[in-house]
Amino acid sequence: MTKVGPASVEFRNVSMRYGAVTAVDNVSFTIEAGKLVTLLGPSGCGKTTTLRMIAGLEIASEGQILIGGKDVTKLSAADRDVSMVFQSYALFPHMSVLENAAYGPTVKGLGKEEAARMALDKLALVGLKGFEKRYPSELSGGQQQRVAVARALVLEPQVLLFDEPLSNLDAKLRRRVREEIRELQQELNLTVAYVTHDQEEALAVSDRIIVMSNARIAQEGAPRDLYEQPANAFVADFIGDANLVDVTVRKVTEGQADVGIGSATISLPARGLQPGAARVAIRPEALLLGAAGQGGSLPGTIRKCAYLGNHLDIMVETEVGELFVVQYGARDMLEAGLPVAVSFAGSGVTLIPPA
Amino acid sequence: MAPATRLALLIGWIGYALMPWYLVEGMSLTSLGWLAEYPFGKAGSALALGLSGQAPWLLPVGAALAAATAVIGNQDRQRVAGVLVWAGLLGMALFFAQAFAIVLKDQGIGWLAALLGGAGAAQRGIGGGAFVTLVSLLLLLCHGLAYRGVCRGDLFTTSTIGVVILLIGLFIFFPVAIILKSALVDQTGALAPMAFVERFLDSSIWGLGCITSGTNCGVAWNTLVLAVLCGVITTLLGLACALLILRTGMPGKRVMRALTVLPIITPPFVIGLALILLFGRAGAVSTLLYEWFGVPRSRWLYGLPGVLLAQVLAFAPIAFLVLIGVVQGISPSLEEASQTLGAKRWQTFRTVTWPLLKPGIANAFLLGFVESMADFGNPLVLGGNFEVLSTKIFFAVVGASYNQGQAAVLAIILLAFTLGAFWVQQRWLGDKSYTTVTGKGDAGLPTPLPRRITWLSAAVIVPWVALTVVIYIVIIVGGFVRNMGRDYRPTLEHYRTGFAVDFSNGIYFEGSAWPSFFTTVKVAAISAPLTALIGLLTAYLLTRQRFRGRGMLEFATMLSFAIPGTVLGVAYILAFNVPPIEITGTGLILVIAFVFRNMPVGVRSGIAGLSQIDRSLDEASTTLRARSFTTLRRVVLPLLKPALVSALVYSFVRSMTAVSAVIFLVSAEYNLSTAYIVGRVEAGEFGLAIAYSSVLIVFMTLGIALIQFTVGERKLGRRKVVALSSSVSDPITQGAAS
């Protein structure tokens, strides 16, 4: 068996309809070979359908899907060189760990020993040496997850798909496993498409993120771009927290806009916006609280202040509405009713188009 | 062209060129006399017969095969697909055209026969070669469709869909259509809608004589009244029993559970038989009453009261099984909530428990209703002058006044009743069930029953259980005494008559019951795996594959569920008595009847089993490059073992206890236990009949144990996975509507 190596995935104007319901609406994107790309979005946004279309478990209603430059739109799952790790792991409960991992090569018709050798190889890679004879029901959640990964890796597919692989693990384990997946992907130079609804997970593992909303792509880009340059209110709110505030762009000169937020005025990159109504997405950590009466800032009143260990969650009532502020480090608690001045940090405030 | 397609083609040529095309009488593997003129003569192959001019109308079918063969080396997938689709489609069309056009002399479709070059000719029913060729043509069509991308290009899926549709069409829709046709023609075969209307409106069917004057009412009314009464009483009994067992500290839970298994392994008329031995004119109880209290012997049992009593005893356990599930499903915390809001026990029962029970009660009633409609054995044994549709159909077919048209009309009425009941059930109950079982743990304790309900229930239940126990004692004892009710001296005479074995030179089964017993076991053993196979495959298609016409297929299996056995029996005898499918009097028709009669049970248990296996397992297998067939074999089937067991067990058991469908289909050579027993009852040999019945009951218990042992447990690791293994086999509710 020759290793084919990773392949790119390309969607050209792909749609998926179930009767009157459109699950994926005219979506186009490319996943470069050897990259990990996350499909991120709230439930029902079409991300899992998109993943299943890459796998061939759903056949697209319209458009073209290419894997490694080859048109696979009408090819069934069994004919595509793609493996998938399922949310439920989908381990065959009546087979041992070894039989599960060796399933791919076995049904492909490779000899028993050859199949077992390939399976053992990958089981060792995910750190499950010595567990071959166990049954899935005798493994912990994390171990089951590794078996699922090993099983998907055995055939060395051109593309590896993960469907919310961490959703059944507890929070501590989730962090460790996502790092392992990332390491494995970089080590083996795999093309990976990864579905999740957890934005932190997406930021942590991805080369690029495709944010989906209502069956369409809301924005796509590197994790940092998405966080710092959200294209719209949805992305700003979905990735990290954001205060969305209606503002007025007073004038635009050389790409810099003078923006009036309530009584305060700040200068922000215009991002192609013209004078008129607009919105800004303000990260909670980009809001700075100071003594009341400072110039160029918004006057406000503390509503609530909650202590969360390494930071404080603060709600501040201002003339533009209630703002959510986070203060890191060991700060003093703020009394409700205290007047403050809210000013803006140099980054973390982004202009976005009006609603 | 895929290897599987080439194989299908090869099989087609074997069927067309080598195998005997027609069904040959006296076919056997030991004496080869029937092969005398092969490849010509009666055992000739289609190719030989066609080329020699004996049956030129068979040649076009071969041309279709040849067309498919011509593209065997062609690389152009789309072109191959097109040729295969057309070859399969036209080949099948030609096949059916010649099969239906040219049958017995001067029957069939004259103009079509002339067109095919067989004017005035006759041919016999299709045999092995013809069937194999037909299946091959079907497979070519399905493979062609798969090449075109239907069902994601999966050969196995398209082929399975094709085969299932062909089988359901041939053995369910075709016979039912023939019934409709028979109802519309007169004795000579000419279309006579007026005759239909006349038969349909006959006073023997719809007459109301029992109300207006002293005569009998029509059979339709009799059947309807009986079914409604049976439904009401069984439901009340089942409900009382379920409430008592789950909501009071009453002992005997396990006994009640065991009682619910009995009706499955008891041939339906055996209860009626036992009732005769107890309450008939010469019955044990009647004799006691006469001798001790001077109560005159009477024939009260023969008629509505007797049939109703027998049916209630036979079907109440089914209602119990349905309702115990419903009562269990009512979350105790709902009732606790009601109580914490200040409701008294009786108020809680009336306002919370009862409304939640209602859908289940409606369901149980409909089951009892349909069961009673379809029952044939008890009305036959106990009916007397009280005729119901199923017995009237029977006498219209086998009686002195043979009347095919009347039988067909009666069958249509019966079918309309049962279909109507099912329709009502689907329409009215389909979305009206209150789900009270959630995944969340529920720590509440069920509320004890209000006292008046407890007493009422107990007053109903105790006599019922007592009577059931007495009935089964009669069944056991009846075989060992000379003459139940008259002469209680113990004897083995009945068993000797039925089951004697002579060991004097080798083993010779000289008992009179042996032939029918062996046939029954053979037929049940052959049909059970076939039923399970077709049922599970259909369930797989319905739950796991998406294709156009899936709704139709689902409806078709539903329909076959609602067809009463008597109707199916009549339909088979009308449809398969003449070419092109001429199999009455053979063992084959019995096997086919059982397979399609029991298929719904297989489908139901398959669907129940599959719904517990997460779809992602199939998908995982597919993304690891396994085709549907591999997935089915390696992943689905091993996990489906419990469903497989229940499908096997119930098709086996039901094959052994069925009466209604097969009573029309048995022949001297292929007689079945139940038909034999009914014959003994009619001849008044109650001892032998009841001895035979107890043998059947014991044998079926052993058979069930054997199947469970052979198929074995599912291997899911050392820890037991509870979620997967529970409730797959909920047999009685699945097999209830027979």
Image (cartoon, rainbow, N blue to C red):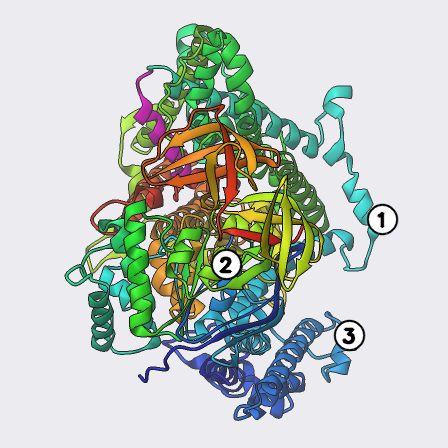
* Residue appearing at x 43%, y 11% in the figure: B454
Q: Secondary structure at mark 2?
A: helix
Which circle marks residue B348 in the picture? none
Is residue B410 visible to us here? Answer: yes
Q: Which residue is mark 2?
A: A226
Residue B461 appears at what percent x and percent y?
42, 17
Q: Which residue is mark 3?
A: B110
Separation (CA) of disc 3 from disc 2: 78 Å
Identify which residue, B671 or B736, lies in the foreground. B736
* Residue appearing at x 40%, y 72% in the figure: B625
Q: Please report the bounds of the magenta region as a residue range.
A: B250-267
Q: Secondary structure at mark 3?
A: helix
**For residue B604, above or below residue B629:** above
Which amino acid type corresponds to the residue marked 2 in the rendered image? Leu
B266 is within the stretch colored magenta: yes
**Badge 2: how crowded within 10 Å, few (<14), some, or many (20+)?**
many
Q: Chain of mark 1?
A: B
* Residue appearing at x 53%, y 33% in the figure: A293
**For residue B459, above or below residue B374:** above
**Badge 1: how crowded within 10 Å, few (<14), some, or many (20+)?**
few
Residue B66 appears at what percent x and percent y?
59, 89
Identify which residue, B503 or A160, lies in the foreground. A160
User: Looking at the image, is mark 3 or mark 1 earlier in the sequence?
Assistant: 3
Residue B40 appears at what percent x and percent y?
54, 87
Is residue B590 visible to us here? Answer: no
Which circle marks residue B194 in the picture? 1
Which amino acid type corresponds to the residue marked 3 in the rendered image? Gly
